[in-house]
Image (cartoon, grey):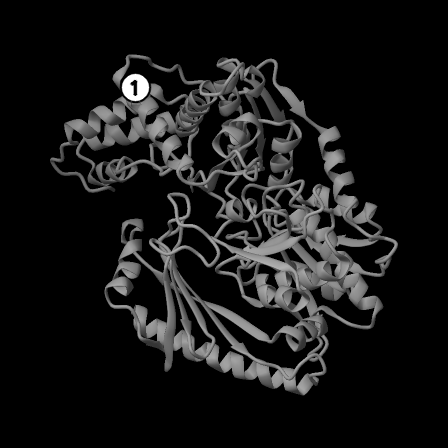
Amino acid sequence: MPETTNVTVKDELRSTVRRWIQLDPDPATRGELSSLLTRAEGSDTEAADQLARLFAGRLAFGTAGLRAELGPGPLRMNRLVVRQTAAGLLRHAEEKLAEADGDAAGARRIVIGYDARHQSDEFAAETAQIFAAAGWEVHAFDRPGPTPLLARQVLVRDASVGVMVTASHNPPRDNGYKVYLGGVLSRLLEPHGRGAGAQITAPVDTQIAATIAAVVAEEFAGDLEVRPAAAPQMPEGTLPIDDDARAAYREEALELLDPAEFPHRDLTVVYTAMHGVGGEMVTELLGKGGFARVVPVAEQFDPDPDFPTADFPNPEEPGALDLALQAAAEHDADLVLANDPDADRLSAAVVDPATGRWRQLSGDEMGALFGAHLLRRGPLRGAADGAAPVMANSIVSSRLLERLCEVRGVGHSATLTGFKWLARVEHMSFGYEEAIGFNVDPTHVKDKDGVSAALIFAELVADLKARGSSAVDALDEIAAEAGVFVTDQVTIRVDDLSQLGEVTAGLRAEPPAEIAGAAVVEALDLTRDPLPGGVLDEATVTDALIYLTAQGDRVIVRPSGTEPKVKCYLEAVADTPGVDSSTEAIAEARQRAAARLGELRESMERLLG
C-alpha cells in the first residue's frame, strides 16, 4: 500500500488542481486528478508527490509545438492543454490579422490534420471547435493521415493556420501538436513569402506561448466550470479534406517521376508503415508509379496507436526493421522502405554486394544518394522564375552533399536544424536532415515528406539496378568524386531539461584548443555567430557550438529540443584519388575516416564527461 503520513497538500497546489479539474472537459483525466487529490488530502504521500510533479510547470510551446506523454495536468498532453493551446493560437492569429490593411476575413481559415495515435482525433476536434466558435472557416481531414498531406493543404487552401496532431515517432503514450502558418498571416509575418506553409520559427513561438499563458491566467481567474463530456466531434460546418485531396497529392507526386529517362521498375520493394498512417498512401503511390511488386509488412501495415511490434516506433531504432528485413529475405527483395508513424520520415535498407547482407542506410547516406540522383535528373520541378536550383541540408547533417554540389557547380545552403529552416531556403530543389527527413518536392510541401521521397528513392534504386549497380556502389562513386565523409553521434543524457544548457555553458567557459590531437582552427557559437553566409537575429540564435579542426574534422554540440540529452555530432573526412578511384582505394579511405571518427568519439566522450 502507498505510504500514508500526516501530509498536507500545499494550499496553492490544492487550489490549482481543483481549478484545473473544474476546467478539464475530459472525464478520464478529470477523474484521475480528482482521485489523486482525494488520496493526497488523505495523507497519501505517493499521490501528493505525483500531483506535485504533474503541476510542476507547463508544457513549453516552441517551434516544434507541443509533444509529451498523455495524461492529466499542464505537463501532459490532454484535452484541456489542447484547448488552451488552440485558444492562444487563435488569439495570436486574430491579433496579427487585425494589423492587416483592409478586410482579412478571407484569411480566417485553418486546416487540421491528425495521425492515428491515442486521442489525436479528439485533439483535432477540440482545435476545430475553438476556431469554429470564433467564426473561422475550418477545414479538417476526414480520417488520420500523413503529416506531409496536412502541410500540402496549408498551401492548397491558402490557410493562415495549419495544425497537425502527431507525436511522429515517439513512444505509444505520447502525442503532440505542430503548428504551420500560411496565407495572409504568413505573408504579414514574413513578407518575403518563403515561410508560407512551413512550421513556425522564433519569435512567433514565444509570442504564441505568451498568448497561451495569458489565456490560461484568464481562465483560472474566472468562474467558468466546464461540464465534462465524451470525446468531442468536429463542429457543424467543418469542410472535410477527403479523398479528392489525397488523390490530388498522389497525382502531384507522380508528376515527379521521369518515366521517359528513368523508366525502370524492375524492383521488389518491402514496405513497412511502422503501425502508422503511411501504408495506404505509399503502397498506392508506388503501384501507380509502376512498381508492381510491393510487399507490405502485414504486422505493421494498419494504424495501431499501441505499436505492438515497436516500443519505440522510429525506423532508426535497433530492431525496428526486423520484420521488414525478414520479409525482404523471404521475398528476395531489392529494397526495404520504412516510414515513421506519421510518414514524414523515410528509412531504407539495401543488400551490400560485398557481404550479401542487408544494410540499413543512414540519413546522410540517403541524402547523398538523393542528391546525386537529383543532380543527374535536374530539379523535379523547375522554379517559376527560372532561378538556378539550390540543394540544402541542416548544419548537423554531413558536408558530403555540400561538397558534391560544389564539384557539380550547383548552389548549396546549410541551415539550422529542422525543416522549418530548410523550407525557407530560396529556390531549394531538394533538402534533407540526417534524422531521415527528406523533401524532394519543396514547391508543394514545406516540410519533410516520407511519402513522395519513397517514390523517388524507389526510382533511383531501380535505375541503379538496371545499370548493373547498387546503392552501395553508388555511394562509392560519390566518394570517388567528392571524398569520404563519415558521421556519428555522442549523446550525453541529463536528469532534467533544465540541465541542458550546462554542457554548452561549460564549453564556452573552457573552449577546447584541440580535439583528438588536431588543433581547433575555427569555432562558431551560434548564440553570437551566424552560420556562414547567414545573418544573426532573434530567429536564428540557437544554443549550438561548432568546431572545425586542422584535420578537416567537424564537431557540433547542441542540446536536444525535445529530450533531456545533449547531442554531439561528429564528422571525419578522407580524400580519395578521384573519379577513377579503385574500390580498394575507396575502402582504404573509408577505413582511415572510420578510424579518425573513433578518435573523435573517444575525445568528445572524455571532454563531455
Among the 4 quarters of the image, the one containing residue 271: bottom right
Say which of 562 and 554 sits in front: 554
Q: What residue is shown at x 67% (from left), y 81% (from top)? A: 578
Farthest-out residue, left: 6
Dot 1 amino acid type: Glu
Give percent across and percent down for residue 360.
62, 66
Q: Which residue is mark 1?
A: 218
Describe residue 480's horizontal placement relative to residue 94 as left or right: right
- Quarter of the rendering occupied by the N terminus: top left
- Quarter of the rendering occupied by the C terminus: bottom left
- Whether residue 325 is visible, yes or no, is no
Give percent across and percent down for residue 22.
32, 19
Say which of 481 and 22 sits in front: 481
Q: Look at the picture and state if 540 lies above or below 152.
A: below
Q: Look at the picture and state if 130 lies above or below 558.
A: above
Give neighbour class at mark 1: few <14, some 14-19, many 20+ (Cα, 10 Å). Answer: few
